[in-house]
Amino acid sequence: MMNEVYKCVCERLQDLPRVANELLQHIGDSRIVLLDGGMGAGKTTLVKHLCEALMVTDNVTSPTFTIVNEYATKSGEPVYHFDLYRLEKESEALDFGMEDYLCSGHYCFIEWPEKAPNLLSEDAVKIKIDVDNQERTFKLLV
């Protein structure tokens, strides 16, 4: 069972940079970050702001069709962004080498993690995004 360690209600997109910084502070040493939210909840938008906070220099886009995007920070460290929505079987994640990414020690932001539950480590953290009208609630679970 995961415990909530941070919660924030966000009504404006302008608040997302602050929310991303606060989430990263509370994540601690974990580098596997699962994003839980329905279609259109803002998972990719949050990843963009998390990457900005990590000083990613690349353009952050949805990896819907590529499944994984790799970005570089100012210091040259990679950050990985997964969108597993299109996977039909968990074995497809093995086929593109997801385990290697997850064991790299670098940040891995994973949208639709429920598509590959057996590949994800127990030390992963989850950001749950709930939407109510224009208001979004972000909960960090560890």
Image (cartoon, helix red, strand yellow):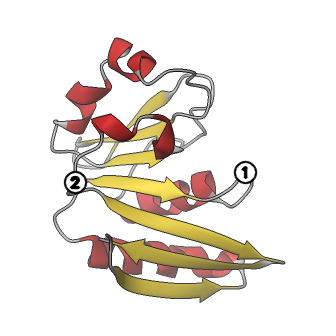
Could you tell me which quadrant the N terminus lies in? bottom left
Q: Is residue 63 above or below residue 50?
A: above
Say which quarter of the image contains residue 59: top right
Percent x, y for residue 90? 43, 25
Badge 2 vs badge 1, beta-carbon distance below 8 Å: no
Q: Is residue 101 above or below residue 112?
A: above
Q: Based on the displayed image, in which of its 4 quarters is residue 118 positioned?
A: top left
Image quarter in which the C terminus is found: bottom left
Task: Compare marks 2 and 1 and give the one earlier in the sequence.
Answer: 1
Which one is nearer the viewer's eye here, 46 or 133?
133
Amino acid type assigned to the residue bearing label 1 in the image: Met
Q: Which residue is mark 2?
A: 122
Residue type marked 2: Glu
The label on residue 39 is: 1
Does 106 sit left or right of 52 as displayed?
left
Element marked by disc 2: loop
Residue drawn at the location 46% of the way across and 44% of the way down: 113
Residue in the foreground of this view, choosing between 83 and 48: 83
